[in-house]
Image (cartoon, rainbow, N blue to C red):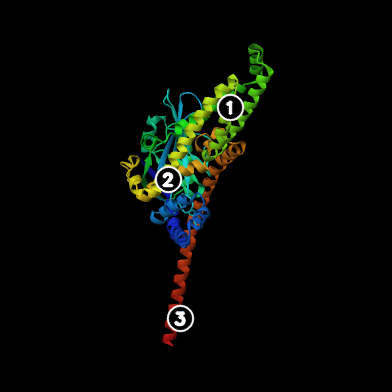
């Protein structure tokens, strides 16, 4: 599907300048890497070269090539589908990957901004809410109502995605706001935007259906298994009153109760990892706890309940990690076959953009936590505080900045006009002096 993207024009101008520097950096890195490989005398030296490159060398290569061969701020989109935290809710995370060189840095081992908006739909009522990224990865405090569009696809098709690379922000901009709150917020952001000029272009977005049906990439299954484990853990731990009631009614022996407590404490620790560490760092602790509970000779009822949940979690996580790895490997090793993949049918993507998509998909699993990707309610207390601060400060700061720019603009024009008049007067005086000298 196509989505309209707006980017402030000044970022395009800055990017054109910085991309030439980025291209030189990438070309130097590529040349040095190839020379090291050529200078290797045997397999041991060649292995050493790969160790020095690290496990992100394919990512460096793919994103560096994208920056070197792309237009300023080239962007591709991706939609991940996942369950909501409450019944009858489903979420969609719309990612935008920008070939953005981060201004004057020397780094090219990244895709620039990987920002997102989160859309939640109530399956029963049809209510649709959207949270934009305020800045630096933090989500808006108040959602934008998209119910009027009827579906997420129509909402994205009718609206704009407004990218603000300097603030690491991605916002949804409605063609016309409805409702008092939406209208008020839109007016504030319009004021904050000032009289800036924007560049608008259509970008291709791979939908959740594209990657689930064509790539069999089931992120929804993984997220659902985490939420289910969290729900069961909360049910078993419960409140003190419920615990006392169950102990009296069920007459649980002390040694069984102690084993259950230990198991649930380990599940609590695992849930902390599942919410606050990237998926690539989760597999080992999941498998370790799964094997421990599965090997119990006489498991308790609680342990028997937890084992299949951990098994499903391990399987679903392994599945998306291996598929992301394979996708990136194929984009590097078998470019021709990868470029013809069904997932890209009907999309106007260059070869470089397709390779960048593969690198980005894996990089999300390496860098972003599940709480960050789609569940800001599960964020750490530090991140929740940052969300409140950024959500409260960024809009007023932009409005102030816009006001100051509005004041400076006529002053700047007035000063420029005076400078021109002074220059003209100076030239006229010089001409008069020369004429007087000639007359003498």
Q: Where residue 328 is drawn, which disc sits there? A: 2
- Judging by the rendered image, the residue that carries numbered circle 3 is 433
Give the secondary structure at mark 3: helix
Q: Earlier in the sequence, mark 1 or mark 2?
A: 1
The quarter of the picture where the C terminus appears is bottom left
Q: Which residue is mark 1?
A: 293
**Residue lying farthest to the right in this orientation:** 254
Residue under the point 58% across and 38% down: 388
**Where residue 122 sits in the image (x, y, percent)?**
44, 26
Residue situated in front as seen by the camera: 181 or 162: 162
Task: Say which residue appears at 38% left-offset and 31% top-offset.
Answer: 151
Camera-nearest label, 1 or 2: 1
Q: Estimate the x, y position of residue 352 in percent, counting from the top left.
A: 38, 51
Question: Looking at this view, is 382 or 399 the one in front?
Answer: 382
The local secondary structure at tag 1 comes to helix
Q: Nearer the viewer, mark 1 or mark 3?
A: 1
Coordinates of residue 235 in the picture (x, y in percent):
58, 21
């Amino acid at each position: 599907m196509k989505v309209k993207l707006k980017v402030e024009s000044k970022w395009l101008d800055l990017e054109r300048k910085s991309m030439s520097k980025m291209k030189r950096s990438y070309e130097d890195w590529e040349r040095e890497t190839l020379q090291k490989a050529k200078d290797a005398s045997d397999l041991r030296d060649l292995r050493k070269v790969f160790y020095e490159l690290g496990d992100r060398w394919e990512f460096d290569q793919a994103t560096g090539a994208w920056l070197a061969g792309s237009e300023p701020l080239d962007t591709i989109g991706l939609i991940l589908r996942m369950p909501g935290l409450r019944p009858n809710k489903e979420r969609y995370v719309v990612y935008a990957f920008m070939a953005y060189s981060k201004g004057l840095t020397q780094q090219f081992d990244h895709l620039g901004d990987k920002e997102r908006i989160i859309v939640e739909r109530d399956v029963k009522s049809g209510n649709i809410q959207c949270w934009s990224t305020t800045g630096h990865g933090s989500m808006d405090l108040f959602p934008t109502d998209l119910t009027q569009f009827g579906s997420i696809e129509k909402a994205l098709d009718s609206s704009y995605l407004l990218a603000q690379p300097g603030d690491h922000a991605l916002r949804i901009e409605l063609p016309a706001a409805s409702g008092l709150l939406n209208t008020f917020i839109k007016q504030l952001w319009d004021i904050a935007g000032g009289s800036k000029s924007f560049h608008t272009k259509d970008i291709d977005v791979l939908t959740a259906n594209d990657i689930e049906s064509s790539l069999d990439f089931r992120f929804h299954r993984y997220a659902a298994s985490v939420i289910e484990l969290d729900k069961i853990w909360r049910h078993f731990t419960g409140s003190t009153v419920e615990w006392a009631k169950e102990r009296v009614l069920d007459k649980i022996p002390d040694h069984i109760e102690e084993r259950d407590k230990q198991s649930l404490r380990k599940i609590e620790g695992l849930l902390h990892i599942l919410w606050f560490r990237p998926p690539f760092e989760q597999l080992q602790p999941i498998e370790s706890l799964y094997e421990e509970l599965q090997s119990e000779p006489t498991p308790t009822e609680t342990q028997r309940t937890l084992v299949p949940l951990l098994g499903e979690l391990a399987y679903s996580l392994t599945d998306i990690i291996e598929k992301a790895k394979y996708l990136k490997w194929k984009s590097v090793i078998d470019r021709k076959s990868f470029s013809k993949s069904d997932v890209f049918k009907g999309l106007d993507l260059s070869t470089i953009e397709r390779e960048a998509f593969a690198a980005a998909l894996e990089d999300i699993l390496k860098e972003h936590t599940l709480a960050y990707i789609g569940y800001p309610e599960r964020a750490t207390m530090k991140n929740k505080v940052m969300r409140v601060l950024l959500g409260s400060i960024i809009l007023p700061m932009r409005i102030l900045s816009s006001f100051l720019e509005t004041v400076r603009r006529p002053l700047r024009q007035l000063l420029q006009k005076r400078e021109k008049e002074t220059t003209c007067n100076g030239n006229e005086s010089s001409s008069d002096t020369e004429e007087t000298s000639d007359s003498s």
